[in-house]
Amino acid sequence: KQGQPRVNVTVVAARNLPTTQRWGVPDPFVIMALGNNFHKTSSLAKHLNPTWNQPFAFGIPPRVPQGMLMTLTVEDLSASLRDEPLGQLSIPLSEVQNRRTWEGWFDLKGAQDITGAGAVPAVHLRIQYDEAGV
């Protein structure tokens, strides 16, 4: 909405996604949420290092609850009913507002890789806080 603050996020890519014993190489997609707003990337078949470059915009409510988080979950399409994400992360909205622009690789938590390679799964995000909502 015009004039309402928002956060613009581009889900650029992921790297070192885990393989699983049951499902093998994942068909990954990302679900992002801020408050009651959700966005989902397309899924990519059999990828451990997918590239999406998908932009999303989240409107910010006039009264932001203390400690509001922007959350990201990487899921596997072939195993989406099992409710075991490939990895997750949370970013405090206050941190996004303070930084204004933020780009980089964010480590995913909770990823279990059966290969034992030891590489940390991460997602590349480009985040911009737009106070005017233009």
Image: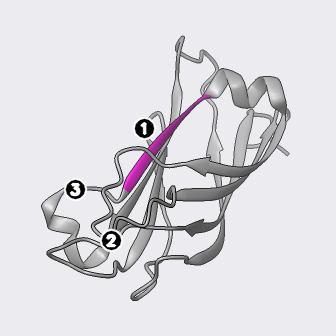
Q: Is residue 95 left or right of residue 116?
A: right
**SS for tag 3?**
loop
Considering every residue shown, the one lying at the far bottom of the view is: 45
Percent position (x, y) of residue 52?
61, 75
Which residue is labeled 3 in the image? 84
Quadrant for residue 112, please give it.
Answer: bottom left
Q: Residue at image x 70%, y 42%?
A: 7
- Secondary structure mostly seen in the magenta stretch: strand
Badge 3 amino acid: Glu
Q: Is residue 86 left or right of residue 120?
A: left
* In the depicted structure, whether residue 91 falls above or below residue 108: above
Classify the position of the N terminus by image quarter: top right
**SS for tag 2?**
loop
Looking at marks 2 and 1 on the same chain, the residue that comes earlier in the sequence is marked by 1
Quadrant for residue 82, please give it.
Answer: bottom left
Looking at marks 3 and 1 on the same chain, the residue that comes earlier in the sequence is marked by 1
The answer to whether mark 2 and mark 1 are in CB contact below 8 A is: no
Front label number (3 vs 1)? 3
Please give the count of numbered marks on the rendered protein: 3
Which residue is labeled 1 in the image? 36
Q: Residue at image x 34%, y 78%?
A: 26
Q: Is residue 72 magenta?
A: no
Mark 3 is surrounded, within 10 Å at the Cα level, by few (under 14), some (14 to 19) or many (20 or more) other residues, namely: some
Which residue is labeled 2 in the image? 115
**Which span is picked out in magenta?**
87-92
**SS for tag 1?**
loop
Badge 1 amino acid: Asn
Percent position (x, y) of residue 51?
62, 77
* In the depicted structure, whether residue 79 falls above or below residue 110: below
Looking at marks 3 and 2 on the same chain, the residue that comes earlier in the sequence is marked by 3
